[in-house]
Amino acid sequence: MTTAAPSVFQRTLIAFGSFRRIFKDPDFAQAVAQLATNEDISLPAPVVAPAPAIPLATAAPDAALLLLGLLQREGRLVDFLHENIQSYSDQEVGAAARVVHHGCQRVLHEYLTITPVRDEPEGSRVTLQRGFDASAIRPTGQVVGEPPFTGTLLHRGWRVADTRLPQLTSTHDLRILAAAEVEL
């Protein structure tokens, strides 16, 4: 691998930070000598171990479609989200949002038990110890160094503690979130 001439800063870092390596690694010593003369540097390519592949799981759509269908049936959520609300007044949108909120909240209470990830009130000072669950807690802001981290709890987070989704017949098509209605 050939690189362009290094900057003065790069030369200084190598010269002052690597004296011990110069004495132990002849290839490195040659590279440092080439830096001093502004020659092209040719080093063997570094050996980098590939990151282990983490298999991705495919989420089954059935439960998601069932829940979305329930939110549509009880709260008309899909209707509300597909509606262009730009032409409505804030009062009209607010009135519709109350109906959607009430119906969707009813679905959450009936079919799921949802609890906070953290028990402290929002705004509390919390400390994240080494080994904290990164899937349940997301540090934000200037995350530098290693835990423990101390910061302010901005959002308690939510986790599903229990699900009680209804059972379905094998002929039920979950892709139909709301059947078309035809008045006769």
Image (cartoon, grey):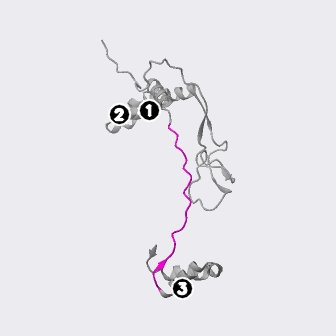
Which residue in the structure is indicated by mark 2?
83
Please give the range of residues in magenta: 38-58
Q: Nearer the viewer, residue 161 or 75?
A: 161
Q: Is residue 126 magenta?
A: no
Q: Is residue 46 above or below residue 154?
A: below
Dots 3, 1 in contact, CB < 8 A: no
Packing grade of label 3 (10 A; few <14, some 14-19, many >=20) is: some
Q: Residue furthest top?
A: 184
Mark-to-mark CA distance, 3 and 1: 71 Å
Local secondary structure at mark 3:
helix
Q: How many marks?
A: 3
Task: Residue at 32%, 16% (x, y): give it.
Answer: 182
Query: The C terminus is located in which quarter?
Result: top left
Amino acid type, residue under disc 3 in the picture: Ala
Q: Nearer the viewer, mark 2 or mark 3?
A: 3
Mark-to-mark CA distance, 2 and 3: 69 Å
Which residue in the structure is indicated by mark 3?
33
Q: Position of residue 26 (x, y in %)?
A: 59, 80
Amino acid type, residue under disc 2 in the picture: Glu
Image disc number at residue 97:
1
Task: Residue at 46%, 84% (x, y): give it.
Answer: 39
Q: Position of residue 135 (x, y in %)?
A: 59, 46
Packing grade of label 1 (10 A; few <14, some 14-19, many >=20) is: some
> Which quadrant of the view contains residue 148?
bottom right
